[in-house]
Image (cartoon, grey):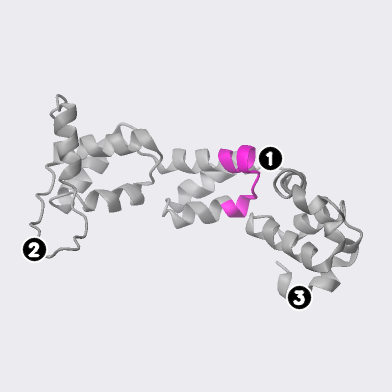
Amino acid sequence: MNTSLSPRVMFLADANCPFPMMDSEKPMRAPLKREALLEKALRWLSQRDFSVAELKTRLKTCAGSEYDVEWVLERLEGARFLDDGSVAERRARSGKEQRLVGRRRVEQELQARQVDPDAIREGVSAVYDDVDEDELARRFLQEKLRTFLASGKLEDPKELQRAYGRMRRAGFPHGSTVRALRQYSELAGNFDEMAGDELEG
């Protein structure tokens, strides 16, 4: 592999990446050779996480052949620069520690990114298996939905249902959500009856 590509060459390599053109008269740009394709992939990976499927899709927009794409992916995976297991675990840690979201939300996000199912299961389990989801739901309500805790909002049925919906979309199960809300709302004491069967889950 040519590792002596100058910044100028790297810039030109970016310019060679084909995108849909509005003007049909513009010439098609040449696809990248596999060494340049590998350089581009490394640059993308230095900027953010990619799942294998995400990077494969992106490389196809610049590659001359499927073989070149697979050649790049094999080398990146072999060197551990590309690893669905690491992507899953990092996303799970972010979900638990920064975003305070439930396990199900992280799983859905990773599925949307086409992360390998085994990697999702192992990565999320490594982070969430010891999590008290009731406690995490309470923290999410306190820190991310604190506006609902002001001025008795949660005693308003519509506001209570809004808070419930936000927590369910954040990946918390029905039971953990209701138990968290009951700590801050008397109305949530009979929330199941008020909300209706359609909110069960």
Question: Is label 2 in contact with label 3 (beta carbons under 8 Å)?
Answer: no
Residue shown at the point (82%, 51%) measured from the top left: 149
Residue at which label 3 appears? 197
Question: Is 108 covered by the magenta stretch?
Answer: no
Determine which residue is flagged by label 1: 130
**Is residue 81 visible in the rendered structure shown here?**
no
Q: Are marks 3 and 1 in contact (CB under 8 Å)?
A: no
Of the residues tagged 2 and 3, which is closer to the observer? 2
- Name the residue carrying label 2: 25
Quick one: 115 or 28, which is closer to the camera?
Answer: 28
Question: What element does badge 2 sit on?
Answer: loop
Task: Calculate the distance from the C-alpha at mark 2 to the C-alpha at mark 1.
Answer: 59 Å
Q: Which residue is most to the top?
A: 4
**Which amino acid lies under the numbered mark 1 shown in the image of this protein?**
Asp
Amino acid type indicated by mark 2:
Glu
Nearer the camera: disc 2 or disc 1 = 2
Q: Is residue 196 above or below residue 35?
A: below
> Residues in magenta?
93-105
Q: Secondary structure at mark 1?
A: loop
Residue 7 circle label: none
Q: Residue at x 72, y 70 (%)?
A: 199
Question: In the image, what residue occupies the spot 41% across and 55% down?
Answer: 114
User: Where the C terminus falls, by quadrant?
Assistant: bottom right
**Above or below, 105 relative to 47:** below
Q: CA distance from mark 3 to mark 1?
A: 30 Å
